[in-house]
Image (tube, grey):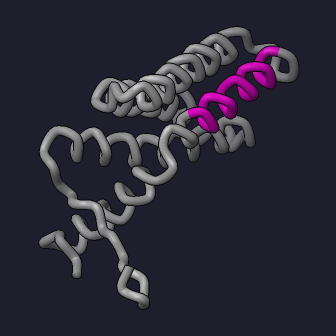
Amino acid sequence: MDPNESKTATAAGALATVSENVDPFPHYCVALACMSGAAYAHYTMKNPTAAMVAGGIGLAMAYAGYSLQTNRVKQGYDLGAAASLGLLAATAPTAYRTRDPYHMVMTGVGGISAIGNMTKSYQVRYGTPRPIYVRSSSGR
């Protein structure tokens, strides 16, 4: 039975349920992607500004994951949402303009991460959307 009132809340509830089961792992993955992107920007693109931005966002995401791991949930999701939006804002204009693979990938990672973190941040504050739990056919 779906505890949410609308289709949008149901979709967000499904995302929140997945997030509950896998966090803080996605935050560490985004941090690793940002750190890898920082190394790529520094060594291959010869762009120290992009490297600094990606590295800083990577550190913020790693700390967001650590905050979630140590039960500072609100702080973790808020920091993760801010870092994700920062990543999106830093890479989207260049991705749109140049279609550079680095910026395209980082824009996608930032967008997906922002949606997940903002959904969970909202859920932590207001209790909605409600997570969706599926019972097995054996009734357990």
Q: Is residue 83 left or right of residue 3?
A: right
Q: Is the magenta region chiefly helix, strand or loop? A: helix
**Residue 42: percent from the left, percent from the top?**
79, 15
Q: How many marks?
A: 0
- Quarter where residue 122 is shown: top left
Residue positioned 37% across, 59% down in the render: 17
Farthest residue toward the bottom?
A: 137
**Residue 43: percent from the left, percent from the top?**
86, 17
Q: Is residue 120 left or right of residue 95?
A: left
Q: Is residue 91 left or right of residue 77?
A: right
Residue positioned 28% across, 30% down in the render: 74
Can see residue 97? no
Quarter of the image for the C terminus: give it. Answer: bottom left
Farthest residue toward the right?
A: 44
**Residue 32: percent from the left, percent from the top?**
68, 30
Can see residue 39? yes
Quarter of the image for the N terminus: give it. Answer: bottom left
Residue 70 part of the magenta segment: no
Say above or below: 63 vs 49: below
Residue 31 part of the magenta segment: yes
Residue positioned 68% across, 44% down in the render: 99
Residue sitting nearer the eye, 140 or 79: 140
Say above or below: 129 vs 39: below
Residue positioned 22% across, 47% down in the render: 123
- Quarter where residue 82 is shown: top left
Residue sitting nearer the eye, 106 or 28: 28
Q: Is residue 46 left or right of residue 61?
A: right
Residue sitting nearer the eye, 47 or 28: 28
Magenta-tinted stretch: 28-42
**Residue 5: percent from the left, percent from the top?**
12, 72
